[in-house]
Image (cartoon, rainbow, N blue to C red):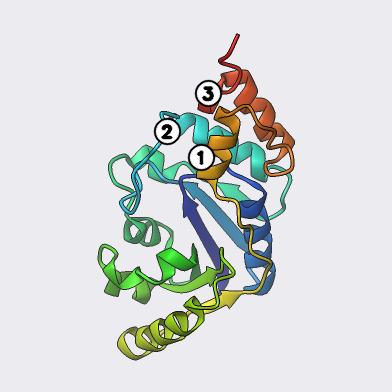
Amino acid sequence: MTRIGIYGGTFSPPHNGHIAAAKAFMEQMWLDLLFVIPAATPPHKRMECPVSAEDRYRMTQLAFSGIEGVYVSDMEIKRGGKSYTVDTLRELSGEDRRLFLLCGTDMMLTLDEWHEADEIFRLCYPVYTRRDKDPLLDSVIVKKIAYYQEKYGKIVRKILMEPFVVSSSEIRKKIEAGESVDDLIPPMVGQYISAKHLYGSNDRS
């Protein structure tokens, strides 16, 4: 049985937190292969920046290059339209495969509201990572995981890692303001952003 991880998102831009989460996901879930999949149009969030799917895909390739077992896929971009997780799971599923889906706390807490939630839980084992240090969420998470286990018969596992508290949106704001993000994103991603003048970088003369 091949253990395959799925890590989707907008990746605008991909940052060191994404990479740390992917590595922890692979190690702690004993994955044979990890698909990192930039979304075409994410159904759960509004795209706040005019960066093309091709640029996000290319940045994601650069960010994860050299990490053994990681494959950056453009399947959702090629598919077009809203990137529903259930469609990706169907595409990657197989009798000889066990699928694991990684998501952040916010997405994990709303999994039952996703498109064809029953099918998502049937096709994969959800896994989450904390992106926050809010102790008030602890009891909410415990209750939600118990609810999922009762309703769908699946235990939602947790990846243990130090939260990366800076989000992609905050990184975009820093870039637009001309602030350094060298400690937040991989060097090749930073070089790509500068070369392509993304997120308002190098736009001032």
CA gap between label 3 and label 2 equals 10 Å
Residue at x 65%, y 41% (from the top left corner): 63
Confirm or deny contact between disc 3 and disc 1 (CB under 8 A): no
Q: Name the one closer to the observer, 71 or 186.
A: 186
First along the sequence among labels 3 and 1: 1
Left/right of residue 51 with respect to residue 129 in the rendered view = left
Q: Nearer the viewer, mark 3 or mark 1?
A: 3
- Residue type for callout 2: Cys
Q: Position of residue 147 (x, y in %)?
A: 35, 86
In space, the residues marked 1 and 2 are separated at their CA atoms by: 8 Å
Tell me if mark 3 has few (under 14), some (14-19) or many (20+) residues whose alpha carbon lies within 10 angstroms of its own: some
Q: Residue at position x 41%, y 28% from top?
A: 50
Classify mark 2: residues with Cα within 10 Å, few (<14), some (14-19) or many (20+).
Answer: few
Q: For the residue labelled by badge 3, is the local secondary structure a helix, a strand or a loop?
A: helix
Query: Which comes sooner in the sequence, label 3 or label 2?
Result: 2
Please name the residue shown 52% across and 57% down the image.
Answer: 7
Which residue is denoted by mark 2 in the rendering? Answer: 49
Residue 183 x/y as whole percent? 74, 43
- Would you name the residue on which mark 1 appears? 12
- The answer to whether the residue labelled 1 contacts the one labelled 2, judged by CB atoms less than 8 Å apart, is yes
Residue 19 in the image, given as x and y percentages of width and height = 66, 53
Q: Residue under circle 3?
A: 200
The quarter of the rendered structure image containing the C terminus is: top right
Q: Secondary structure at mark 1?
A: loop
Q: Amino acid at mark 3?
A: Gly
Disc nearer the start of the sequence (1/2):
1
